Each structure stands twice: as structure tokens, then as C-alpha cells.
Image (spheres, rainbow, N blue to C red):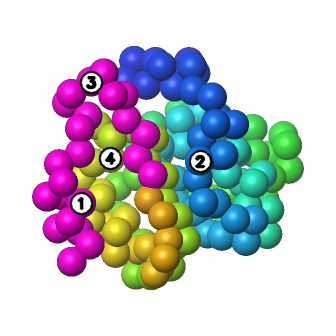
Amino acid sequence: MVNNNNHSILKIDTHKIIATLPIMPYQTIVCMGAEEGLFPILFGKYVFDGKVIAYEKSKSNIDKTKKMLKKINLGNVTLKEFTKELKIPIASVDGAFISNWNLYNDTLEIFTLALKKNSWLTILINSNDKSQSIPKSKISKSKK
């Protein structure tokens, strides 16, 4: 069951998301918000020889996703529990995807430091929820 913060996550057209991302089969992707496996599995299948590192705050979602990954034998996805001491090596990531801005907005600076040159960052927000808007100052501050 998906938590209330992301109750609309099941309404997302994942094919449309993949079509809009500059994702390539060899890339290393960091995914904040494993949910119940939706995005890590989607990205894991797409990057093929690449890898996906997914962070999640909910232990229950981590367990569910691990079971699904084992069931479909997808070995290029690593799941980690989100902590405030999140460490991602600098310039080690080709793309980053944040599925829940409200839960992970304090990690933007870590993500932008982890991105390689010419990489991408995608933040999934609900455009109807004004509390999820991303201040321009926060993005530009992280990229300096």
C-alpha cells in the first residue's frame, strides 16, 4: 500500500516519464524514493548494464522492493535506507530522480554534488500542490 504522501504515485504514466528523461542504458542513476519498487525497477530495467542506487525512508517499502527485485532477478538495483548522513561520491552519478519532493527536498545539495558533468536531475512534483514548488535559489545555490 502506498502512503498518503504519494497516493497519486499509482496514477503516473511511467512510460511518459522514461520518454522525457535523457536516460541511457549504461548510466548510474540515483533514485530518491523507492516507493514500492516502481521507479527502481523501471530504471533498473532501462539502464541494463548500468546501475540504480535507490534510497527509501520506509523500511517496509525497502523490504517489498527487495522481494520484487529477487522475484524478477534484477541485479543492477541497490536499495539503501535513507539517513541524514547520506553519502554519495562527488561526480559519480549520471542522473538523479527524486520521486517525492516533500520527503527528500533537503537532499538536493547532495544530489547536485554527486552529478557528473552533463548529467540530469528530475524532481517529480504535484503541480497542484504549491508547497512542492522548488525555489530557484535552492537549485542555483546547489550548482555553484
Between discs 2 and 3, the one toward the N terminus: 2
**Do labels 1 and 3 touch, CB within 8 Å?**
no
Badge 1 density bin: few <14, some 14–19, many ≥20, Cα 10 Å: few
Mark 1 lies on residue? 139
SS at badge 1: helix
Whole-percent x, y for residue 22 in the image = 60, 60
SS at badge 4: helix
Q: What stretch is highlighted in magenta?
A: 122-144
Residue at 19 percent of width and 30 percent of height: 131
Between discs 4 and 3, the one toward the N terminus: 4
Mark 3 lies on residue? 129
Between discs 2 and 1, the one toward the N terminus: 2
> On the image, which quarter does residue 108 sit in?
bottom left
SS at badge 2: helix
Front tag of 2 and 3: 2
Instruction: Give the distance between the C-alpha atoms of the residues marked 2 and 4, in whole angstroms.
Output: 22 Å
Whole-percent x, y for residue 88 in the image = 42, 72
Instruction: Give the distance between the C-alpha atoms of the residues marked 4 and 1, in whole angstroms.
Output: 14 Å
Residue at 37 percent of width and 65 percent of height: 111
Picture quarter with the N terminus: top right
